[in-house]
Structure formats: C-alpha cells, structure tokens
Image: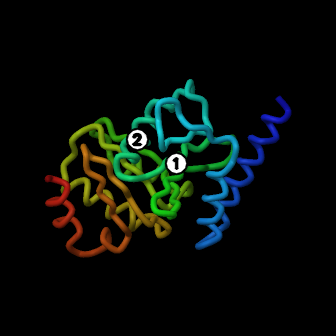
Amino acid sequence: MEEDLRNSSDIALELAQLHILRGIEFSRQLQSITMRKEFRLVKGETYIYTAISESDEDFPALLSAAQRAVTHGYRVFILPNPKGIRTADFIFERKGLFRMYDLKTIQGKSSIINRLAESIGQTNHVLLNMATTYNGRLFATQIKRYFELNPQASEVLIFKGGQAISIKRGYALDKYFVLSFSRKYGK
C-alpha cells in the first residue's frame, strides 16, 4: 500500500512538472512518463496502455477514444488523474512524437466552446470525440473562438466517424477557416 502511494505521488510529480516545461524538455518528460511501470497494456489491445483501473468510471469513454486513436496510427497511454493536479487524459505517440490530449466526448448539442474551455490549463491539445452530428459552421466558429480565448492552445483533434481532423492554431485563426472547415467537416 505504501509503495502504491509513493509510486502514485511520483507520477503525480512528473505530471505536475509538465505545467512548467516547454519545448524539448516537455516532450522528453512526456516520453519519460510513458516508460513508467504504472502503465500496463489493456487486455485485448496492442497499442493502448493504461495507468488507471479498467473499473474506473471514465475508463469506457477513454478506451473508446483510445481505440479510435489507434486506428489513426497512434500508440496511446491513458493517464491517471492525481488529486490536486490538472492533467490531460492521454499521451499519444506516433513516429516518435509525443503529445498530450484532453478528451472531450461530444454526445449532445451542448456548446462545444464550453467543453473546449474546460481544458484550458490542462493541455494545449484537445481531442473531440464526436458521438453526434454538429453543424459545421457553428462548430468552426466555436473552435475559432477557443483559439482566440486560449493563446496557449496548439491543436484541436477531431474524431468524426473514420476521420481524424487536426485543427492547428494558424489554420483556426485564418480568415477563411470557418468556410474551409465547414466544407471539410460536412464531408
């Protein structure tokens, strides 16, 4: 029991450091976290590792999004949620590049901007796992607004059906973004 608490706090400290690191140090820290012994391969999966219990109430939604990420070529690490530290839900790795994502599953017609705003301060990358249809123009307007509100935001990754749509800051703040994204999203 004491060993588990010490290991849990160790990963909590490593996750907390992510809030002060930038650039290559941030990437190295992400990679270091994925090598921790807390991560175990999820039963029946090849590229999904978890540091939380499969009985955790959030696990089914996290696993669903992780499985979609694997179909797009990612190796996925489901992160724990230590008390008192705002952390993302995942670390994705593809071709040696590590990124941290906060998951927002969109199931209803609630405002996407509110869900995106919840991730401010957790990570610069947000994953929207679409489980419903959404008006493309309204969606684009809300993504653009999120990037305007959050100067640290780097990417919004959208899983819609079999598609993965990556929206980077520069694209979202372009004057033609709403029109361009509306067309792309509608396909």
Q: Position of residue 146 (x, y in %)?
A: 38, 60
Q: Residue at x 18, y 66 (%)?
A: 180
Tell me the element at label 1.
strand
Tell me the element at label 2.
helix
Residue in the foreground of this view, choosing between 120 and 103: 103
- List the residue tagged with mark 1: 90
Q: Residue at x 65, y 61 (%)?
A: 29
* Residue 69 relative to residue 39: left or right: left
* Mark 2 Cα shell of 10 Å, populated few (<14), some (14-19), many (≥20): many
Q: Is residue 64 above or below residue 126?
A: above
Which of the 4 quarters of the picture holds residue 23? Answer: bottom right
Name which of mark 1 and mark 2 comes first in the sequence: 2
Residue in the foreground of this view, choosing between 89 and 42: 42
Q: Position of residue 81 (x, y in %)?
A: 62, 41
Q: Position of residue 57 (x, y in %)?
A: 53, 27
- List the residue tagged with mark 2: 65
* Residue 185 relative to residue 90: left or right: left
In space, the residues marked 1 and 2 are separated at their CA atoms by: 10 Å
Q: Residue at x 27, y 39 (%)?
A: 109
